[in-house]
Amino acid sequence: MKIKILIDDKHEPDEVTLVTSKMTEEIKQLVKDFNSKTLLASDRGNEFPLNLDDVLFFDTGDAVVYAHLVHASYPTKYRLYELETLLPSNFIRVSKSTIVNVKKIKSIQRGISSIREIEFHNSQKSVYVSRKYYPLFRDKMEERSI
């Protein structure tokens, strides 16, 4: 894929144009990543936009999906399967109840019976990668490191 940036100080507002011979998964993901920067969360009945760059992971608890940040957790109105389609590619499902932001991963520790524990930068929070989801998680992590 080739990227071309044209700077024209007379052109307002900013505009992004994609020219392609056909719609591919890569282009769909690019558009999704470009459009997905915030997500609605709630706190004591008030809804507010949550910056996805601040989210460590999403998980379910008491039939509610929570967005976990370094020092707080906020309920969202989404289900995990909905988040999988809405979130940019740096979010990966690691278990039946958890989606992680790979940009925030500090380390992955191997535990008993092949379960991996993910630790996050600047946080005491951690989550586990289930054996079922580990092969997909490993493949996506390898894709990102290339």
Image: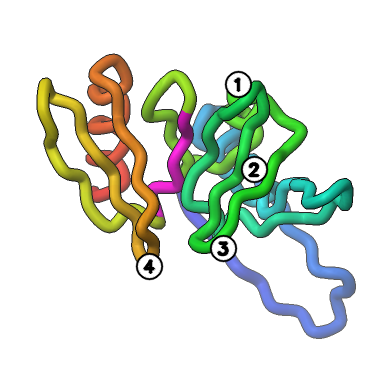
Query: Counting residues from the N terminus, which is met first, the one under dot 1 or under dot 4?
Result: 1
Query: Counting residues from the N terminus, which is met first, the one under dot 4 or under dot 2?
Result: 2
> Few, some or many C-alpha atoms within 10 Å of disc 2 (few <14, some 14-19, many ≥20)?
few
Instruction: Using residue 77 as the reference point, say whether residue 30 is left or right of it.
Output: left
Residue position marked by numbered label 1 in the rendering: 81
Residue position marked by numbered label 4 in the rendering: 122
Question: Is any atom of residue 34 visible in this view?
Answer: yes
Tag shown at residue 63: none
The secondary element bearing badge 1 is classed as helix
**Residue 116 at what x, y percent from top left?**
21, 34
Q: Residue at x 13, y 24 (%)?
A: 114
Magenta stretch: residue 102 in it?
yes
Alpha-carbon span between mark 3 and mark 4: 36 Å
Cβ–Cβ under 8 Å for marks 3 and 2: no
In this rendering, is residue 49 above or below 7? above
In this rendering, is residue 17 above or below 31? below
| Tag in front: 3 or 4 | 4
Cβ–Cβ under 8 Å for marks 3 and 4: no
Magenta stretch: residue 68 in it?
no
Magenta segment main secondary structure:
strand
**Residue 106 at what x, y percent from top left?**
28, 57
| Residue stretch in magenta | 98-103
Alpha-carbon span between mark 3 and mark 1: 34 Å
| Tag in front: 3 or 1 | 1
Residue position marked by numbered label 2 in the rendering: 31
The secondary element bearing badge 4 is classed as loop
Q: Identity of the amino acid at label 2?
A: Val
Residue position marked by numbered label 3 in the rendering: 4
